[in-house]
Image (spheres, rainbow, N blue to C red):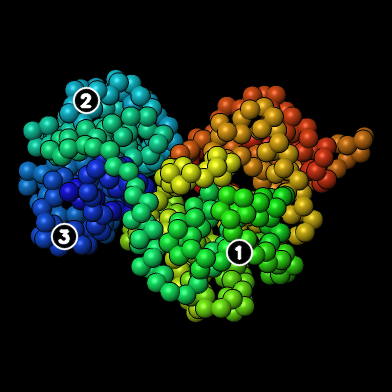
Amino acid sequence: MIYIVDFGSQTTHLINRRIERMGVPTKIVTPSKFDKAFSKKKPSGIILSGGPSSVTQENSPTTNPKIFEMDIPILGICYGLQLTAKLLNGKVISSNMQEFGPAQLHILKESKLFENIPKKSMVWMSHGDRVERIPKGFKVIGKTKDVDIVAISNENKRIFGIQFHPEVSHTKYGEEILENFVKICGLEVKESKVDIQNIVDKLEEEMPDGNAICGVSGGIDSTVAAILAAKAIGKRLKPVYIESGLMRIGTKELVKDIFKKHVGIDVKVIRAKGRFLKKLKGVTDPEQKRKIIGNLYVKLFEEEAKRVKDVKYLIQGTIYSDVIESKGSEHADKIKSHHNVGGLPKNMNLEVVEPLREFYKDEVRLLGQDLNLPKEIVFTQPFPGPGQAIRILGEITNKRLKKQQLADQIVIEEFKRFGWYDRVFQCFPVMTGINSTAVKGDSRRYAEVVAIRAYESKDVMTSSWPYLPKELLQSISSRIVNEVPGVSRVVYDITTKPPATMEWE
């Protein structure tokens, strides 16, 4: 077993998933509980995760320095590297040269950690501090253009540290690096697939009697969650579509058709657009929007539950990236609330069941394929639970909502027409709430700026923006300024994650 000490990184759980896919058991422990876990069972290896803190600050999370004397392989990642250097009398400083996003790793010396890894490859960075002096007995085995100490090792003691994140999909040889560490720990690597029957059995135990309501939206998460629940409890599942008015054009019809055609279940439609717009009137704070939408969704489900006999459970398609962005661990920073994580009132009368809470987006797609779901569902682009509400910055009005939905339809149509829809993880417009001067028909106009967001990702924890063809961007811009009323100009967002999140709010 490998222990992963969680210092609050957004991707700690992803380290766990990557290694468990290799058939190796892991255990995530917080720094405060590490000593207790260690005393019960000595692990084959230890990984010190990244985190939002700085080792240069007082009271930053730490670990027992005795672990470096116990002849156990250790890998420090990002914050874990800096902590390793600090605890072993190296030097860490807060740097003006911060790195967020892609960087090219240059391997300087041979190391078991970098076995069969090319001398140069792309890695993913997210750090402000850096190691200035390495501990005694260590050597520098990697650097980037801007940072001289990016990877260190003490091969004899089997202690390693890397500034980049091997667990994220944008580190090209990240899985191979983690696999090398697993082998250094003396563990056998073998492919491990998720057992669907185990998930179904667990759901049967969680819902032994009574009916369950499941909100469906046409997205991969809610669909897979619903199918798994249907396999567990059969006709006790009652799928419901909330017509909030915040979704894409044609979503309701798509959802009804998919579930009738591929699952054989009728979906109950609850029309509630007016109630959502009324609740959101005058609200501009994104966190408030998410809470309002989450609370109203649950209220509507509770109202529906009273109409249906013996409903005890609310099934949600929450995935792990939702959980971690809503602060899923002891030392993690809260990034944003998700309507299905923390938007739920404490007095909710239904028990929440989340079949996908431990899975990432790429794993959910694999589950969808294993369930033989049609390609149109498995590879549909993700759509946020709060819908267009978090793509409209500022107050949401019916007029702005219609503008956003029309712009969204144009973006999707053009990406498909140019053959780019399946090449990106997601593409959508954002009503920025910023007005800009324009000239239309020889007259001055002062109207809204629309931003286009497109990115490539596998697990939603990191992303990069694609170099889209000029013709595609030109066509989107032309159509939006001409077909969507009240728009003055279109811009393209070229920010990676990190530092930016996928959605603007």
Give the vertical position of 283 relative to 24 (above or below). Answer: below
* Residue 423 percent coordinates (x, y): 56, 31
SS at circle 3: helix
Residue at x 56% of width, y 78% of height: 309
Give the vertical position of 215 relative to 351 (above or below). Answer: above
Mark 3 vs 2, N-terminal side: 3
Q: Name the amino acid type tagged 3.
A: Ala
Residue marked by disc 2: 115
* Residue 440 percent coordinates (x, y): 88, 37
Which residue is at the far right?
442
Q: Are marks 3 and 2 in contact (CB under 8 Å)?
A: no
Residue marked by disc 1: 240
Alpha carbons under labels 3 and 2: distance apart: 31 Å
Alpha carbons under labels 3 and 1: distance apart: 43 Å
Mark 3 burial class by Cα count in 10 Å: few <14, some 14-19, many 20+: some
Residue at x 28% of width, y 38% of height: 191
* Residue 505 percent coordinates (x, y): 58, 53
Q: Name the amino acid type tagged 2.
A: Glu
Q: Is residue 221 left or right of residue 156?
A: right
Mark 3 vs 1, N-terminal side: 3
Residue marked by disc 3: 37
Residue at x 9% of width, y 37% of height: 157
* Residue 469 percent coordinates (x, y): 64, 24
Q: Is residue 405 left or right of residue 234?
A: right
Mark 2 burial class by Cα count in 10 Å: few <14, some 14-19, many 20+: few
Give the vertical position of 384 relative to 474 (above or below). Answer: below
Q: Name the amino acid type tagged 1.
A: Val
Q: Is residue 499 left or right of residue 96?
A: right
SS at circle 1: strand
